[in-house]
Image: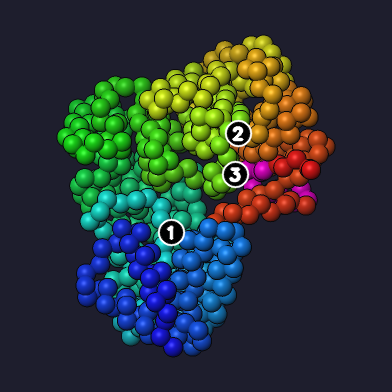
Amino acid sequence: MEPDVSYLDAYFQHIKESGCELSRLSLLKVKQQLLDTQWQTPQTAVDFNNVGVVALIEAQRSSDEFSRKLFFEMAVEALDQGAKMGHPLCQAHLALSYSLIGELDEAIKLAFTSFIQYLQATFDSHYTIPAGLIFLPTKVETEPGQPTDLQELLLESDGYTQALKLSAWALCFAQFVFYNASGLRLLQLAVQQLPDSIVLNLQAGISHLVAQRQEGLYFLQRARGLAPDSSPAMQALAIAYRDQGNIALAQTWLDRGKGMQSHQSREWRWAELAVDSSFTYLTFEPDLLLAVEPSFRSIVTSVLLAQGDWFEKEMEFWRHWLKPGMTVIDVGANAGVYTFSAARQVGSTGKVLAVEPFSGCVRLLKETCRVNSLGWVKVCAGAASDRNGISKLAVQSASELNQLMEGEVEGAFEEIECFTLDSLCEREGLSQVDFLKIDAEGHEVPVLQGSQNLLEQSRPVILYENISGSQGSNLAVSEFLVAKGYRLHYYQPFLKELVEISSSQDIQGKLNIIALPEK
């Protein structure tokens, strides 16, 4: 049966939204694939792949959770059937589907198995299978006219080659590559399969430099060569050369960025700053400039420049649940990823308090407030704790890893003010707090102990970090909150669902936990 026009519309809209610009001949090829697919009664593995792809597109476009879940389940069912029939592209799409909903272990296992299993067939011309449609979620936007990863995958004429490249891409999508050597390995593998990917070259360059591997400059130069007018690539080069102490080359890239300001675009504002500025600007959310450290020592700078957004899946929850007029407290705000996302959601009728002890991050927070005129955000310098007084903050090379310490501190530290959240609420005249986010590098229990009145009177939704650095799951926090009448959940992205945690075993390995008060 020929597809309803909605199938054609859905896929061509996906091509358009990806920034993919195909030739007329390539578009005709895609249209023929759509026309040849048995949508209502799929027969072949390629049919099942194409049905799964369009179902994923419809799930992504759905505005309500019920429809999104229904389409996602349809996609997984079709892709699983196609994978059982032996088509590697179905298996690669299935891996990508699991990564979308945060089931990363399963996603990595499937993608890596597919990659290894079909290597022989990909590089042996005796093996060929039909190509299929491709689904890729949008990660980092590219400028109009620049090649996209979707474009490269669609232009392949053999399903084995498509599957190998998509599997490599899915491995990077499923595993955050900035924190560990295995993630960096996967990224190198993906770049080998998609050498003309602007996104992957940019990510490879930055992640190598985060790992202090100077060959990252090669990938950044490749990304800039593929996209000569790319603001992220130019800014990354300016930061990389500044980190190396090569101020002349850093200035060269700043000057080139200034030459692009005829675009009058927010994304080029970083080029206005001096080469020795204590901060740089990154675009964040649709309409905000975020002041961040101009160095790849900063995880925030590295992630936002490479990924275009923060990597934690709970950011989607944050944006979905916060509403205009709400009051939010962000404990451990750092450079303000959650703070300013909240500011945009609650609007000028709401209020956001950013609690941050490190002086360098306090300056960044205040600069972001200034440059965006965010009068409803209050930066509170100091550390939330179980007492009011003075303490010490051990300062690490990456500010995200700074820790509040008691007693003697080895290495660099700052003396900081400590205060309870109860005293902060009293000082700021807050009668109600709707959301509380806590990222205190292992100090979460003292923060909660200093929030007794806040927890009892406001009953805020709480998002807290469950795993800090190399530490295991923070069971003490979960026990504290359960005793206070909270139910614990983890967030399933894409489907936008909160899944209740029924045992301490369910908490293991979860980076963040969301606690909802019992009604």
- The Cα–Cα distance between marks 1 and 2, rounded to whole angstroms, is 30 Å
- The Cα–Cα distance between marks 3 and 1, rounded to whole angstroms, is 22 Å
Q: Is residue 508 magenta?
A: yes
Tell me the quadrant of the picture where the N terminus can be found: bottom left
Q: Nearer the viewer, mark 1 or mark 2?
A: 2
Q: Which residue is mark 1?
A: 137
Quick one: 302 or 405, which is closer to the camera?
302
Could you say which quadrant of the image residue 305 lies in?
Answer: top left
Q: Assign a secondary structure to mark 3.
A: helix
State the residue at coordinates (45%, 71%): 54
Determine whether 425 is above or below 45 in the image.
above
Q: Assign a secondary structure to mark 1.
A: loop
State the residue at coordinates (47%, 51%): 183
- The Cα–Cα distance between marks 2 and 3, rounded to whole angstroms, is 10 Å
Residue 240 lies, in percent from the top left, at: 30, 35
Q: Please tell me the numbered disc located at residue 321.
A: 3
State the residue at coordinates (55%, 80%): 81
Determine whether 195 is above or below 394 in the image.
below
Q: Which residues are magenta?
A: 503-514
Q: Which residue is mark 2?
A: 326
